[in-house]
């Protein structure tokens, strides 16, 4: 350690560089603190095993025309419905202007596979599971689905027609792998 | 907390003035860690470990809260939930390894902090309360660390819980019922795991509370220093901020470097392979050892192999192990020397270093199987441990003739600089 | 008061310890097995150490083949999912096909009876036995351990696993009778008590490697051990890589804090 006078001499011309060092040290601490927050927040995102279940393959060969099944994708109910010609015609007959959430049935199914209506079974009002997928359940006033919680009625294309729900039942992303197997997600 | 030479807090900004009237947190911070807390100017690096222990606790609390979001305290899934964290949770492996090695870092830092206190007589008047609260923190840390080690529900978790709770069964008559009460069963099982998880989450916050008391009690007399001479006036001190915040910043940097090297490059070195085997109540690992930070105490436990008086060996071991920590509570009164710093205590200093070597020896013996020569070494080690505190220390503090001491911290600092300059010019 | 009482207590402990010293025999009971027990041989893998470790994917793939064709007959791999083998360099399509080759437990949707179905990438390697009792019953009451964590769950780690796999041999002539392998046991000097319930699992050319590597016992042991190092810690390489970034960041930070500390203290003697 040098004497008092030598130290003071050193400070005189070094002030700028030395202030810079203090600022740099504090800045590094700040950057480090932010960097460590990333993994601490990222851990709350879906983990690898959850993401691995984010696509589901469904075998639709057993669903007869006019029937529907309830399956699940990402732990949410999914309705897969094999529409008959009459139901498709009913859906097509509705003028778009009458719909709360205007969409044609063609927009809600895949080309050439208009009879396969695949939607989430989650009412767009407050998230209840609508009835109508299983045999004998209330299909509502429009022959599609009926949500018992607050009385939303969906038609044969699962579009909202009556009741509080604001939107049609959501069509999840899906692909036909073959005529009988669909991958959702 | 008020020293005549402390800078008073004088808010200038209207907002700070307003705040000072309603909730004077800025004043508290200023007087606790800001320019309002004058600290002896001659502290060496051993005075960094208090702040580092606080940093280690914060790391444990933060990583622990995050782990608790994914861990499941149920005997049938606990092991796999930890592996789920290691494999599937985003950055889970990092957080889990940080928590695991963070516990070791916490103990390394706290042990250095304790030995600093032993060498420099930090436990002596007027800081007895600081020391007593520190021993309480140490005990709480041990309980927390033990219960945390049970949570992954591996073989060492299970058998560690079995052995430690087995201590209680050494107590005559009430021992066995107490043990069953602690476990909620006859062996560690789901009930044990659940209550340990609950307490493992609770105790760190209790530790935090006692740390606040520890710092509060410290700030009444102010920090001690390597000379052991109390502060006499302002020139003996520097304000905590920026002087010791800067020095602690550097200390935190070095601490984190070691912590990171351990966590990323060698995370399992301080652990035990058996804890990667799921708990099995029907098969004991060949060699049960606790985590490294308990090894000296474990060696003391194992050193007692003889039924003496009406107490059997097992109970002697358990009593001695608890006594080896409990005697720290009496340290301020066992050592009657008015001199704090071992720098001026030639005789005690020798015994201090023997104690350091002794605790390291006990730690080494704690790791070994119950074979010779480790048994006799741990017996000799335990003899010295008790002799040091209960026999040697009270005698030494009576017969010792201290070295001449400077009159003040400033005088010591100036004398040190004079010799430094002299030797510098001599070499030049 | 404290000092006299402390003195008495100290005397009590010390007397108990001194008596313990004089009553404990100074010699150990002879452990003959120690003489024959061998320390594991070192196995060098690409994933070792902290100097640029990496996964040797070709080796891991071969190791997985050994696990699938040999080890999986008795040993489970519960913690590894088919999706995880993307780390080994397999494509999504290959993983799907690979998973399909396994039957995983399921429930017959019509009867509720236990059944099996084709594996999916999200499924885990299925266990060879339904439960521990079945595993013991099929193996002479010895439980084949799960291999997911085996290289972390044994002292000696990968070296031990490699040594064990290559260490089967005839018992030495001077082996005392009580250490000779009994019925259903096999001599292996790397195993703690020298006699292992597992029969030598590997024989030359037991598997046929697609990449043409010669399938010697040593090669297969190396490969499957490398694979088990991966299963024990799939994040190992990432850990080292992130570690370097964090370490060098902190190194610069520490140097800066040191300079800052010297700077702030420059005018203070201490």
Image (cartoon, coloured by chain):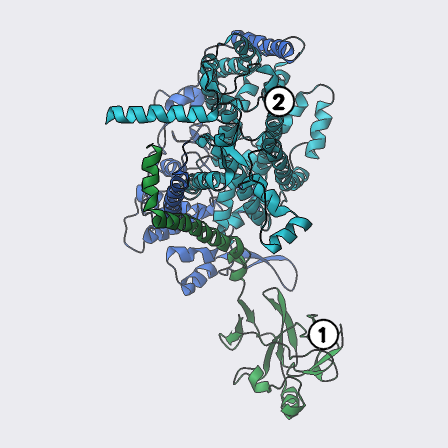
Chain colours: A green, B cyan, C blue
Q: Are marks 1 and 2 on the same chain?
A: no
Q: CA distance from mark 1 to mark 2?
A: 70 Å
Task: Give the quarter of the image for residue B406.
Answer: top left
Find disc 1 in the rendering and name its residue.
A131
Can you give x and y, in whole percent of width and height, for residue B134 in the image? Answer: 59, 29
Q: Using the image, name the chain to which the residue with label 2 belongs.
A: B
Residue B274 or residue C104, whichever sits in front: B274
Q: Secondary structure at mark 2?
A: helix
Can you give x and y, in whole percent of width and height, for residue C209 in the image? Answer: 32, 53
Residue C261 or residue C235, whichever sits in front: C261
Q: Residues within 10 Å of mark 1 (few under 14, many from 20)?
A: many
From the viewer's perspective, tell me whether residue B299 is left or right of residue A168.
left
Q: Secondary structure at mark 1?
A: loop
Q: Quadrant of the C terminus of chain C?
A: top left
Q: Using the image, name the chain to which the residue with label 1 belongs.
A: A
From the viewer's perspective, tell me whether residue A8 is left or right of residue C135.
left
- In the depicted structure, whether residue C10 falls above or below residue C58: above
Can you give x and y, in whole percent of width and height, for residue C122 in the image? Answer: 51, 59
From the viewer's perspective, tell me whether residue C10 is left or right of residue B375.
right
Q: Quadrant of the N terminus of chain C?
A: top right
Q: Residue at x 41, y 45 (%)?
A: C228
Q: Residues within 10 Å of mark 2 (few under 14, many from 20)?
A: some
Find disc 2 in the rendering and name its residue.
B329
Can the viewer see residue B153 in this picture?
Answer: no
């Amino acid at each position: 350690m040098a004497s008092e006078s030598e130290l003071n001499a050193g400070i005189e011309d070094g002030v700028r560089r030395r202030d810079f060092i203090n600022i740099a040290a504090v800045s590094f601490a700040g950057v480090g603190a932010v960097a460590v927050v990333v993994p601490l927040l990222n851990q709350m995102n879906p983990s690898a095993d959850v993401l691995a279940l984010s696509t589901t393959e469904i075998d639709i060969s057993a669903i007869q025309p006019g029937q529907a099944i309830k399956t699940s994708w990402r732990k949410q109910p999914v309705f897969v419905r094999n529409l008959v010609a009459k139901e498709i015609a009913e859906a097509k007959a509705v003028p778009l202007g009458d719909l709360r959430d205007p969409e044609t049935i063609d927009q809600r199914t895949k080309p050439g596979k208009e009879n396969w209506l695949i939607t989430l079974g989650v009412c767009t009002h407050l998230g209840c599971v609508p009835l109508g997928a299983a045999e004998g359940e209330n299909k509502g006033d429009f022959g599609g689905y009926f949500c018992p919680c607050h009385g939303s009625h969906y038609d044969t294309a699962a579009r909202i027609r009556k009741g509080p729900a604001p939107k049609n039942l959501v069509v999840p992303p899906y692909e036909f792998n073959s005529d009988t197997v669909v991958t959702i997600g | 907390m008020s020293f005549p030479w402390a800078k008073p807090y004088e808010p200038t900004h209207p907002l700070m003035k307003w705040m000072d009237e309603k909730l004077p947190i800025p004043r508290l911070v200023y007087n606790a860690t800001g320019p309002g807390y004058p600290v002896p100017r001659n502290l060496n690096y051993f005075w960094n470990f208090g702040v580092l222990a606080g940093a280690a606790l914060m790391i444990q609390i933060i990583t622990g809260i995050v782990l608790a979001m994914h861990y499941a305290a149920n005997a049938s899934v606990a092991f796999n939930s930890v592996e789920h964290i290691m494999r599937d949770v985003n950055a889970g492996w990092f957080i889990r390894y940080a928590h695991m090695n963070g516990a070791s870092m916490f103990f390394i830092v706290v042990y250095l902090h304790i030995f600093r206190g032993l060498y420099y007589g930090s436990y002596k008047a007027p800081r007895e309360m600081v020391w007593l609260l520190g021993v309480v923190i140490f005990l709480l840390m041990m309980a927390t660390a033990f219960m945390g080690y049970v949570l992954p529900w591996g073989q060492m978790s299970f058998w560690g819980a079995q052995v430690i709770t087995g201590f209680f069964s050494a107590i005559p008559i009430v021992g066995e019922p107490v043990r069953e009460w602690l476990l909620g069963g006859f062996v560690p099982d789901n009930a044990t795991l659940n209550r340990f998880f609950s307490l493992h989450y609770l105790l760190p916050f209790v530790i935090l509370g006692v740390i606040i008391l520890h710092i509060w009690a410290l700030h009444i007399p102010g920090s001690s220093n390597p000379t052991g001479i109390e502060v006499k006036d302002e020139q003996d001190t520097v304000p905590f901020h920026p002087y010791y915040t800067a020095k602690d910043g550097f200390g935190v940097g070095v601490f984190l470097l070691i912590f990171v090297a351990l966590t990323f490059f060698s995370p399992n070195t301080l652990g035990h392979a058996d804890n990667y085997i799921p708990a099995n109540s029907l098969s004991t690992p060949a060699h049960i050892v606790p985590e490294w930070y308990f090894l000296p105490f474990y060696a003391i436990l194992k050193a007692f192999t003889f039924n003496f008086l009406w107490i059997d060996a097992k109970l002697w071991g358990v009593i001695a192990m608890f006594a080896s920590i409990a005697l720290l509570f009496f340290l301020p009164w066992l050592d009657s020397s008015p001199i704090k710093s071992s720098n001026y205590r030639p005789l005690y200093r020798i015994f201090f270093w023997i104690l350091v070597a002794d605790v390291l020896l006990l730690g080494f013996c704690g790791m070994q199987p119950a074979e010779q020569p480790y048994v006799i070494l741990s017996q000799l080690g335990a003899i010295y441990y008790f002799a040091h505190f209960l026999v040697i220390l009270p005698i030494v503090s009576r017969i010792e003739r201290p070295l001449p001491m400077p009159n003040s911290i400033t005088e010591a600092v100036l004398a040190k600089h004079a010799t430094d300059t002299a030797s510098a010019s001599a070499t030049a | 008061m404290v000092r006299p009482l402390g003195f008495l207590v100290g005397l009590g402990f010390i007397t108990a310890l001194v008596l313990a010293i004089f009553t404990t025999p100074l010699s150990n009971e002879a452990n003959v097995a120690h003489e024959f027990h061998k320390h594991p041989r070192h196995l060098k893998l690409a994933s070792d150490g902290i100097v640029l470790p990496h996964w040797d994917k070709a080796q891991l793939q071969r190791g997985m083949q050994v696990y699938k064709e040999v080890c999986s007959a008795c040993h489970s791999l519960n913690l590894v999912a088919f999706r995880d083998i993307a780390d080994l360099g397999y494509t999504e399509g290959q993983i799907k096909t690979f998973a399909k080759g396994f039957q995983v437990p399921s429930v017959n949707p019509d009867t509720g009876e236990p059944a099996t179905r084709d594996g999916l990438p999200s499924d885990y390697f299925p266990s060879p036995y339904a439960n521990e009792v079945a595993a013991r019953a099929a193996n002479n009451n010895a439980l084949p351990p799960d291999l997911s964590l085996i290289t972390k769950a044994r002292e000696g780690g990968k070296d031990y696993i490699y040594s064990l796999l290559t260490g089967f041999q005839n018992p030495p002539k001077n082996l005392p009778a009580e250490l000779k392998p009994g019925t259903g046991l096999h001599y292996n000097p790397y195993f703690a008590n020298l006699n292992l319930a597992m029969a030598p699992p590997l024989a030359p050319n037991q598997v046929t490697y697609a990449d043409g590597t010669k399938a010697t016992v040593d090669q297969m042991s190396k490969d499957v051990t490398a694979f088990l190092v991966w299963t024990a810690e799939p994040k190992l390489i990432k850990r080292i890589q992130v570690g370097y970034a964090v370490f060098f960041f902190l190194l610069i930070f520490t140097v800066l804090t040191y300079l800052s500390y010297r700077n702030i203290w420059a005018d203070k003697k201490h």
